[in-house]
Every structure is written in C-alpha cells, then in structure tokens.
C-alpha cells in the first residue's frame, strides 16, 4: 500500500480501526458499521488483529508485511483490536514484543484510518 492511502489500482482505500479493552463490544460495533452499506463495495471485517499478529509472530512471519498485503486485497476494511498497552508489562519476552509490535501497528493503522473508535462497555467514542 502506498503512503498516500491509495491502492495501486488508484482506488481510495477506506479503513476504520475499532479498539478497546477485552470484551468491550468491538466485534458487535464493527458488524454494525459493516452493515451500514452505502451501495458501494461491502466492508471486510478483520476481528481480533492482536491475535492474528501473535500467530504471525509465532510462525516467524512479519506481521507488518502480511497486514500491508491484506490491506491491498480489501478496499473497505474495518479492523478490531484489543488494547494491550494499558496493563502490567508482561514478564514473558514474547508477550512484551507482541504487545509492542501490536501497539506500533495500531498506531500506523490509526494514522491511515479515516475513522478510529474506542469501545468501552459497548459504547463507541470516535477518536478520529
């Protein structure tokens, strides 16, 4: 994906990031957003990006590259992710690295996204 937010095809990519603590309603909110189709291409929803990142890291894959590739395949994308950085720093080295990589990827996605929401107790707050 090019830095400008456009895919190589010239189509504008639409990205929405939905974050929050565990079990705060991200998936339900993402499904609600995806259901508000405007007649254009349907939205693709990726749930639990944090878990996908952990799996990629365990398999020795670079999550950033895989996410870029997946973004190029979907022009309208809603991503849900649990907030990992507000708790106690994990003792396990893998968990610390996973938390850092996930946080940095989320910062990059938030920068590129047209909208960012934080969920708390099932209530969305638009941050961007």
Image: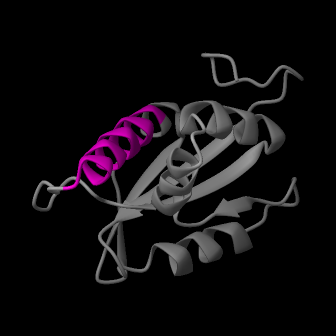
Say if the magenta span includes residue 98. Answer: yes
Say if the magenta span includes residue 52. Answer: no
Q: Label the magenta part by its dominant secondary structure.
A: helix
Most extreme residue toward the left, as rendered? 88
Q: Quadrant of residue 70?
A: top right
Indicate left or right for 126 with 36 as reference.
left
Q: Quadrant of the N terminus?
A: top right
Relative image position of residue 83 (x, y in whole percent): 31, 59
Looking at this view, is 110 or 84 the one in front? 84
Q: Quadrant of the C terminus?
A: top left
Tell me which colouring the rendered structure shows: one colour
Q: Residue at x 59, y 48 (%)?
A: 59
Looking at this view, is 88 or 68 the one in front? 88
Relative image position of residue 63 (x, y in whole percent): 56, 39
Q: Residue at x 64, y 75 (%)?
A: 31
Q: Which residues fall within the magenta stretch? A: 92-108
């Amino acid at each position: 994906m090019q830095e400008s937010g456009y895919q190589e095809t010239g189509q504008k990519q639409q990205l929405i990031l939905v974050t929050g603590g565990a079990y705060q309603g991200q998936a339900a909110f993402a499904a609600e957003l995806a259901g508000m189709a405007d007649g254009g291409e349907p939205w693709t929803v990726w749930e639990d990006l944090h878990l996908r990142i952990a799996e990629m890291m365990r398999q020795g894959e670079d999550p950033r590259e895989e996410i870029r590739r997946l973004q190029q395949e979907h022009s309208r994308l809603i991503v849900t992710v649990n907030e990992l950085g507000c708790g106690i720093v994990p003792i396990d080295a893998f968990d610390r690295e996973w938390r850092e990589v996930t946080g940095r990827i989320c910062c990059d996605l938030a920068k590129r996204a047209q909208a960012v929401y934080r969920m708390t107790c099932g209530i969305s707050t638009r941050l961007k």
